[in-house]
Amino acid sequence: MFAMLALVALAPAGASEVNPIEKIVQMISDLQAKVIAEGTDAQKVYDEYAEWCSDRSAKLGFEIKTGTSDVAELSATIEEETSSIGALETKIEQLSSDIQKDDADLAAATKIRETEAADFAAEEKELTTVIGMLERATSVLEKEMAKGGAAMLQVKSATSLTDALSAMVSASVLSSADASQLTALVQSGSESSDSDSDMGAPAAAVYEGKSDGIIGTLEGLTEKAESQLEAARKTESTSNQNFQMLKQSLTDEIKFANKDMDKAKKDKAQSEEGKANAEGGLEKASKDLAEDKATKEGLHQECMSGAEEFELNTKSRGEELGALATAKKVIVEMTGGAAGQSYSFLQLSSGADLSKLEALRFVRDLAQKSKSPALAQLASRMSSAMRMGVAAGEDPFAKVKGLITDMIATLEKDAEGEATQKAYCDKAMAEATAKNDDLTAEQDSLSTKINQAKSSSTKLKQEVATLQNELAGMASAKAEADKIRAEEKAAYDKNSAELKQGISGVKKALQVLKDYYAKDASHGSSGGAGSGIIGLLEVCESDFTKGLTEMTAEEESAASEYEAYVQQDEIATAAKAQDVKYKTKDAAGLDKTASELGSDLSGVQDELSAVQEGLDKLKEMCIAKAEPYAEKKARREAEIAGLKEALEILEGETALLQKFSKHTLRGAKAHHF
């Protein structure tokens, strides 16, 4: 280097002229450096862009996954609320029908009760009047009998009860109004004796023309009227009690049905509100999901276009660098002789040795610094070329420069290949990642739908099992109720038949005795005993009739209650059976849907496994390297820059020596001339 500095110091001003070939080589080298710098900047920008694409794609994938889940959940909610609304509407219609029926039944029962009450009031009033009239007539007759007199003689001489009543009116013992009513009563009793009327008044022929006979007759009529009044009141009480029980039952049913309807309407309103909210949410979620998918698709296309553009630009720069390296190599290797012919420069051995050694030492230092076997081999080849070139008398500078230039071209070609592979890796990784995200989102969506279908199916099956248990319990209760009703009906048929038979027998006995005593007056002395027997038979008839009436009322009440129970049980059984049918059908549909979705999920999982396997291979090829691309790129650029600097050192010092030698040669010639 000291010799070089000395030569430079001795060089005249004219030595600053530059060899045109060297200028061209320098310009090509500068252009190569510029292209490489542009590639470095473009790589940095693309790396940032690729990272943004990856982050944006991941974010959109998460939003799509969340949106898909929301859409599935909202769709399930709408379906559930729709089913609930349908069930509630059916329930409301059924309850409305039940309420209307109960209202109609209550109105009909109330009307019947009002009629019965009115009939009873009229009958009670009539019987009360008759009893009062009979009691007054008996009292008056007893007083007159105690007094004796002509009036009693007329009464005793009467041949019938009607004549006796007329005699009592004539004697002013009885009012004409009471006599008219009693006469009508006796006549009514006589007319109805053959038809077994409830009044059962003895015929006028039974009267024997004695004062004690008419008193007994009136007392018998009074007792019979009182018995009839008591029976009527008992019947009224039983009817009223049955009506109150029926009214309470129907009122309770209407009350509970209205309560259930209010709750059903409230639940329906809540379900409709929930459905409306879910539909609004579904519309928004579907719109957002569609926008996210469209955005991701646009992002994918945009990022792919960016990757393709970067790949094309990288390839173009690589081709440009290859062309420049080829041109520089051709210029350096093929224009050395012509330049020597044209510019006649003189190589100084001492200066050449210094420049070659300086370049060799620079390459060796660069090889050690970068730990590059290729650069170490280049330094060895440079050393051999220098020794062999000097020994053969060839130009060692051209050989060394050729070696350095070839190494630069090789490194630049490798850099181009790696940049192309990097662009391919980025593009393939982005596509595989996007596909993986799409399949993962689809897998999650299918899994969510399958879980929802299975959950809904399980719930429906549980509800079906509960309904079937309830139906079994209702069937058992119905069988028990049928058994009890049959037993009650059999007991009623048996007991009522016995009572009817007893009543028929008593009536026949009464008829026989009444007929006998009425036509055979010779047995008048035993008439009192006969009257007592007849009275007892009439009491028995009243008791039997009363028992039959009560038994019949109880049977009708039990039958009515049983029929109401059967009707309600049939409605409830039909409703539950329908629920079982629909829920079983819905559960089967959900199971089928889950099975179909399971097949779709299996296909998606297979495709996802294939995509993930390909993605793993891409990662192994593009990412899992001993030396990351960025570090390798930086190291190779440093090697290229170092080799260019070594080439510049070699070319710069050689040119300087050549110019200085040429200037000295020309001066010597002038001196000789």
Image: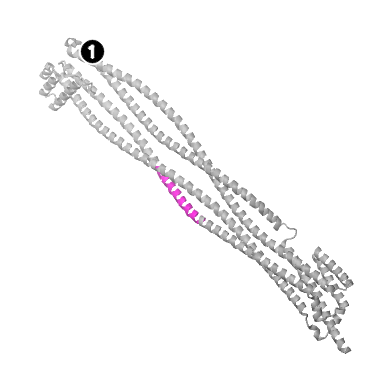
| Residue 279 lies within the magenta run | yes
Q: In this image, 92 relative to 203: left or right?
A: right
Say which quadrant the N terminus sits in: bottom right
Secondary structure that dominates the magenta span: helix
Examine the rendering and report whether any part of residue 457 can be seen: yes
Q: Residues within 10 Å of mark 1 (few under 14, many from 20)?
A: few
Which residue occupies 76% across, 66% down?
410
Examine the rendering and report whether any part of residue 260 can be seen: no
Residue 107 place in picture, x, y as percent: 31, 38
Give amino acid for label 1: Ala
Residue 135 place in picture, x, y as percent: 20, 24
Query: What kind of element bears circle 1?
Result: helix
Quarter residue 193 falls in: top left
Identify which residue, 27 or 667, lies in the foreground. Answer: 667
The residue that disc 1 covers is 529
Identify which residue, 173 or 494, lies in the foreground. Answer: 494
Asked if residue 11 is positioned above or below residue 206 in the image, the reply reads: below
Q: Which residues are magenta?
A: 258-285
Residue 45 place in picture, x, y as percent: 66, 67
Residue 40 place in picture, x, y as percent: 70, 68
Identify which residue, 151 or 182, lies in the foreground. Answer: 182
Check the image and tell me how it is coloured.
one colour
Q: In this image, 10 relative to 528: left or right?
A: right
| Residue 609 lies within the magenta run | no
